[in-house]
Structure formats: C-alpha cells, structure tokens
Amino acid sequence: IFEKVPVSMEINGKAYNLSLEPRVTLLDLLREQLNLTGTKKGCDHGQCGACTVHVNGQRINSCLTLAVMQEGKKITTIEGLAIGEQLHPVQEAFIKHDGFQCGYCTPGQIMSAVACLREGHAGSAAEIREFMSGNICRCGAYDNIVDAIMEVKQGGQTV
Ligand code: FES
Ligand code: FES
C-alpha cells in the first residue's frame, strides 16, 4: 500500500484534483480511474503508441509517464479533440480515408497525427511515415493513415 499524493491537472479542459498512488501511470489514471477509455493500452511499455495523449501540447506515451508527474499540466485525450458534435479535422480525415480497421490503434494514431501536423512534420508521405513510426497498427492501415494526414496538411486546416 502506497501513501496517496495530491495531484491537480487539467484533462480535456476540465480541472481535476486527485489523490493518487505514486505508482499509477497516466494511462491507468485515464482509463481505470477517470473512465476515459478512448486512450488504449497496447503494450504498456512504450512500443506501440496506442496510449498517445498530449501533455501541454506535446505527444507522449501515457503508459511511460506517472500520473503524479502531471501536476499542473494540461492533458488532452482523444475524447477532448472534437468540439461538441464537430469532429476534429484529423478525425474526419481518418473516416474519409478509412484510416483504421479494428480501430484499436486509432486514438493513438489520431493524437499522434495531430501532433505530427502541429510539429510541421507532415511535409511528405515519407516524413509522415517517419514521424508516425512510433504508432504501430497491427491491421496495417498505414497507407490510409498517411493519406488522411496528407489531406489535412494539404487542406491547410488548423489542427
Ligand atoms: Fe503505451 Fe504501447 S501502450 S506505447
Ligand atoms: Fe487495427 Fe490499427 S486499425 S491496429
């Protein structure tokens, strides 16, 4: 049994004041305590990207970071991308281009794709493949994922 630690953070625009065991990962906090199950657990050790979320705008593998390290940070998960009923442009593009099959990797792919675009790393298919290489898709939807990201880039939409 670990002593709990007070931690405050903002998740998808909502303030949370939590009391957490120091060993809890951000991924387990999201999924198991806050019921934000859009973020997926694939490998739980930094190899698949299914757990990708944004912390202060940067993409990270939430399985590799402890929740207590997020004091004062702003977290965005896949649940925080859409605005009401309006899907994020990257979500729209994934649907249009069939950027998924089983969908298990998709939340991580989309969070990574948004970051990839914001980082300016979507200049070509090759660059997208390189900067999306931390996100594994066991269904092999890579071609369509690249197409989706290319379309958002070429459309010049704000992401
Ligand atoms: Fe985090 Fe695989 S679950 S990288
Ligand atoms: Fe199935 Fe990517 S769509 S793992």
Image (cartoon, helix red, strand yellow):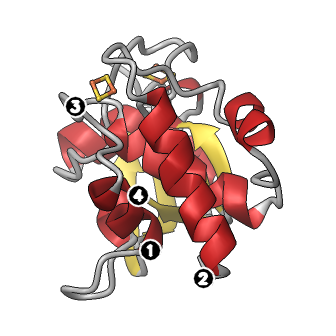
Query: Residue 108 placed where, x, y %?
Result: 44, 40
Residue highlighted by disc 4: 77
The secondary element bearing badge 2 is classed as loop
Label 4 to label 3: alpha-carbon separation: 21 Å
Q: Is residue 149 visible?
A: yes
Question: Which residue is at a point 45% across and 64% down the rendered structure image?
Answer: 90
Q: Say which amino acid is labelled 2.
A: Gln
Horizontal relation, residue 28 to residue 64: left or right: left
Q: Give yes or no for contact between labels 4 and 3 (Cβ–Cβ under 8 Å).
A: no
Any atom of ligand 2 within 8 Å of the CB at mark 2? no
Camera-near label (4 vs 3) is 3
Label 3 to label 1: alpha-carbon separation: 19 Å
Q: Say which amino acid is labelled 3.
A: Gln
Query: Residue 13 placed where, x, y %?
Result: 43, 81
Q: Is residue 52 visible?
A: no
Question: Which residue is at a point 36% across and 63% down the rendered structure image?
Answer: 91
Q: Which is more toward the observer, 24 or 113? A: 113
Query: Residue 151 placed where, x, y %?
Result: 56, 64
Label 4 to label 2: alpha-carbon separation: 20 Å
The secondary element bearing badge 1 is classed as helix
Vertical position of residue 139 compared to residue 11: above or below = above
Q: Give yes or no for contact between labels 2 and 1 (Cβ–Cβ under 8 Å).
A: yes
Q: Say which amino acid is labelled 1.
A: Pro
- Marking on residue 118: none
Label 4 to label 1: alpha-carbon separation: 15 Å
Label 2 to label 3: alpha-carbon separation: 25 Å
Residue density around tag 4, few if under 14, some if 14–19, many if 20 or more, within 10 Å: many
Vertical position of residue 92 compared to residue 143: above or below = below
Residue highlighted by disc 1: 89
The secondary element bearing badge 3 is classed as loop
Any atom of ligand 1 within 8 Å of the CB at mark 4? no
Query: Residue 117 placed where, x, y %?
Result: 69, 61
